[in-house]
Image: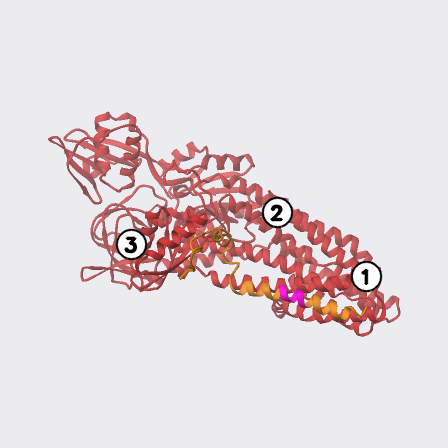
Chain colours: A orange, B red
Amino acid sequence: MAMLVYLIPISLFLGGAGLAAFFWALRSKQFDDPEGDSRRILNDDWDEYPKP
Amino acid sequence: MTATDPPRISACAACSAAPLAERTAGRAARDDAEILLSLPTIHCAGCISTVERGLSATPGARAARVNLTLKRASVTTDPGVSAADLIGVLDRLGYEAHELDPGMLSGSAADRAGRDILMRLAVAGFAMMNVMLLSVAIWSGATDATRDLFHWISAAIALPAIAFSGQPFFRNAWSALSVRRLNMDVPISLAITLAAGMSLYETMLSGRHAYFDAALSLTFFLLAGRYLDHRTRAVARSAAEELAALEVPRALRLRDGIEETVPIADLAAGDIVRVKPGARLPVDGVVVAGQSEIDRSLLTGETLPVHAGQGAELSAGEMNLTGPLDVRVAAAGEDSSLHRMAELVAVAESARNRYTSLADRAARIYAPGVHLLALAAFLGWLAATGGDVRLALNIAVAVLIITCPCALGLAVPAVTTAASGRLFRRGLLIKDGTALERLAEVDTVVFDKTGTLTLGTPEVTNLGEHPRRAVAVALALAEQSAHPLANALADSARRAGVEPAPLADVTEVPGHGVEGRWGEMPVRFGRAAWVGAAPGQSTAAWLRLGDAAPLAFTFADRPRPGAAAAIAALRAQGLAVRLISGDTAGPVTQLARRLQIDDWTAAALPEEKAALVQRLTAEGHKVLMVGDGLNDTAALAAAHVSVSPATALDAARVASDIVLLGADLAPLGGALVTARRATRRIRENFAIAAGYNLVAVPIALAGFATPLAAALAMSASSITVSLNALRLR
């Protein structure tokens, strides 16, 4: 049972990290154009050199 | 748009509203550095990079970003770059583009509200999962110190999560209570706070039962319902706004003989505005120079263009057909048509508020019932146990949680989302949440004629009656004009395989017609009076060859594709179909006969249209009004539910509940079937939720309900209700 002292905080921390990641994605407008973003990955425009 | 166009149904409003934008002429430079374009045909990864590269390479454009979901591109430009330049660039790349008025798009506010609900939903979901896991340990037999520890951890997670996620409910409940009313959020807030408070109290006393997981899952499921509701509305709103944004309000002002493009809001009474052929009048005013013909079908329903010369009074929304007109502004911006529009919208909205939705009706029965039941349980157990407040309160809270309104909270939004998503794909935009319920109740359908049952574009009816030589001359003359009758004649003649006759000195006389010379013979094609003929009953253009008697080419308005199918479908469902039009008796009779509508009224004034709808309503009918013009707006607002095509005037679209995005009218029949199915699903969902309560409430009242039972009942009923909603097709 002593394991709980470690396991519960760890599980809460991991879940919280996921929640924080979701918040970040939401705030940085990553859900604004889901259709376009899924296609942009196929785009090879800036494969050779970075976008200026 | 011609009849040969395949009926287009698409997920973006602009694709189908393109004709609207095509009529919006007079685009020019604007000072803003941000230009929004609607790209209805964009669809692939290649399109994105082609468009972005093409736009970025345009001189003056600094950056371009495509949003494929909304089918829009936003371009940051130097001042002085006009949307027309960018549209030209895209046109060369092979993409249709239309400018959007950013002022009409309030997307960011809706986005923020959606993001807010989503964030609360995420917090509630996260907390629910963790507390649920801890609860599993308790349900499987944790006792004493372990149980207390788990309860305390649950409390530490649940209380802040509820305080954050439950805010929308608490706020709504408070605003309802402060005006002494009950809404769905009152029992929700009460159940959540009581469950959390009771559980905290039990935890302090090392009690056996804590309902933290129930309080959280209640919050989570209800927020999910809220989010669905919000998203349906946001999609409808953004599509409706895009339709409005396609009509960029701009005018060509003449100052000391120089044309300049200004926003309509900047015009003042007395300014002179130039209206080019093919453009819509931006203001009310009087013609000071020029001659033309005016199409006022959107305002009055008349199909026959009206001659406009010096001194003619014109109103905003009319279309200039043949010659340029200089118009002195009589009433600017807010004083004229805009103001009129705002009044009509206010009328429409007050009428709409009188309808009580199914959800509200359910809440009205449900909210007091639940409270009384919980109170009775509390008092009953208090009496039975001789004053054990803790036990009585525990059972009362269990009753509140078990009778959880979460299935009720999901019952309507889940169905509405599914149904409006399906209808959207078929080309119907549901603007109002209760529109589906109202559509399902309809028993009478009233159609407008011009622009609704017909496309407002004429076609020749008697081409075969004329000698081929005459048709060849008429074709040669008609091809020199942009007048809709001339276009229609040229189309049909070309399709009949006629070659234009060789003519000389062809000139268009704005407002009258076209004249020229055929060999030595002077020829004229145009209005009856101009060629020396007596005007007849039906819409006609006349051809005179030399001194011979003029020949009449008669025209009829072309029915909208799918009009016959829609009317047949409506009649097959047992609905009464009526036709009411502001047009003259001739064309109305003709169309009514063609579409087999027995009950029709011609030459109706706007007030008469509204009066007819009100009379039918007073007789106990539920009326569906389908119309597109300013003269239909009052009737659209008065009807139980209303539909307008995407090509309708802005005011008519605002006044109606449903917008038909494609040119095809056929989806209307199916929409009623879907609406009736959706309403049946909503009722079924209420029945399912009630069924769960019927089983669970006696158990809770008897004091046998455990947190496990509450969690099971809640999840099971919510999931059943959602699945039932998804069955809709």
Mark nearer the N terminus (3 vs 2): 3
Q: Residue furthest front?
A: A48
Residue B525 lies left or right of residue B225; in this view the side is left
| Cα separation between marks 2 and 1 | 39 Å
Examine the rendered structure and indicate whether residue B722 appears above or below residue B483.
Answer: below
- The residue identified by callout 1 is B139
- The amino acid at mark 3 is Gly
What element does badge 3 sit on?
loop
Q: Residue furthest left?
A: B520
- The amino acid at mark 2 is Thr
Q: Quadrant of the N terminus of chain B?
A: top left
Residue B71 lies left or right of residue B501; in this view the side is right
Q: Position of residue B339 (x, y in %)?
A: 38, 60
Q: Residues within 10 Å of mark 2 (few under 14, many from 20)?
A: many
Return the mark for residue B679. Answer: 2
Q: Residues within 10 Å of mark 1 (few under 14, many from 20)?
A: some
**Residue name at image x 50 percent, y 40 percent:** B667
| Cα separation between marks 3 and 2 | 46 Å
**Residue name at image x 35 percent, y 53 percent:** B54
- The amino acid at mark 1 is Trp
Q: Which region shows up in magenta?
A: A13-18
Return the mark for residue B26. Answer: 3
Q: Residues within 10 Å of mark 3 (few under 14, many from 20)?
A: some
Mark nearer the N terminus (3 vs 1): 3
Q: Image quadrant of residue B2? A: top left
